[in-house]
Amino acid sequence: MDTVRVWTKQHINVLNILNETGRYTARREYIKKDLGEHAPLVLEVYDWLVRHTPTKNEKPADADYPVWVSVSREATMLPSDNFVILELALDPALIAKVNIFKWGAILNYSYIPADDQDADRHSRLLAEYGVSDTKAYMSQFYPMIKREIIASWDRLFDDSVSLGNQDYYGNIWEIRKEWITAILQ
């Protein structure tokens, strides 16, 4: 089996869990603790991601959210206190690719246009209502625009739709101890 090398920045407690149980899955309570008061804003789009991630492997019952991995060492978040960077060797089929620019648009509650004409059409729609994507999404007064924004997020996994860059992160449903090839601190 061919493997690909990826990296993930994790709290030191993840390493402790891996040493105790042999595997780790991202749980809602971990994310809430990590994000604090911003958790409700981010978890809303993470919940969408979980429901829409195409994957060849099934999500384990104890995994609330995916684990983010970087496909290059340089793109991994910088080391910091109480965190480690785990280098993993994985079967590429375990990784769902997530375009960095499109995911950023989703985190900002933005519309992902199908093409330039669609981007222009959507911009005109926002101008007609005098709102931004974020305001339309966060408000109860623009349900049609909010539905359009959310529907556009399905383009996250459509490689034919580009926001100008094809760089991506990966998502996996779990980390297994036997996948670790190096621990960087």
Image: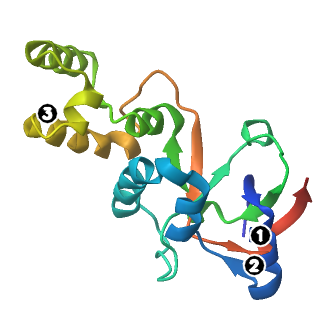
Q: Is residue 95 visible?
A: no
Question: Which numbered disc covers residue 145?
Answer: 3
Residue 182 is situated, as x and y percent measured from the top left of the image, at 90, 61
175 lies above or below 62: above
Of labels 3 and 1, earlier in sequence is: 1
Kindly report the distance in space between the C-alpha atoms of the residues bearing marks 2 and 1.
Answer: 6 Å
Query: Measuring 8% from the left and 14% from the top, which residue is drawn there?
Result: 128
| Amino acid marked by disc 1 | Asn
Which image quadrant: the N terminus? Answer: bottom right
Q: SS class of the residue under badge 1? A: helix
Q: Which residue is mark 1?
A: 13
159 lies above or below 133: below
Task: Give the camera-side residue of 129 and 25.
Answer: 129
Q: Are marks 2 and 1 in contact (CB under 8 Å)?
A: yes
Query: Measuring 42% from the left and 55% from the top, which residue is drawn there?
Result: 43
Residue 46 is situated, as x and y percent measured from the top left of the image, at 42, 55
| Amino acid marked by disc 2 | Ile
Query: Measuring 58% from the left and 33% from the top, which residue is drawn there?
Result: 167
Residue 149 is situated, as x and y percent measured from the top left of the image, at 23, 37
- Choose top left, top right, bottom left or bottom right for residue 110: top left
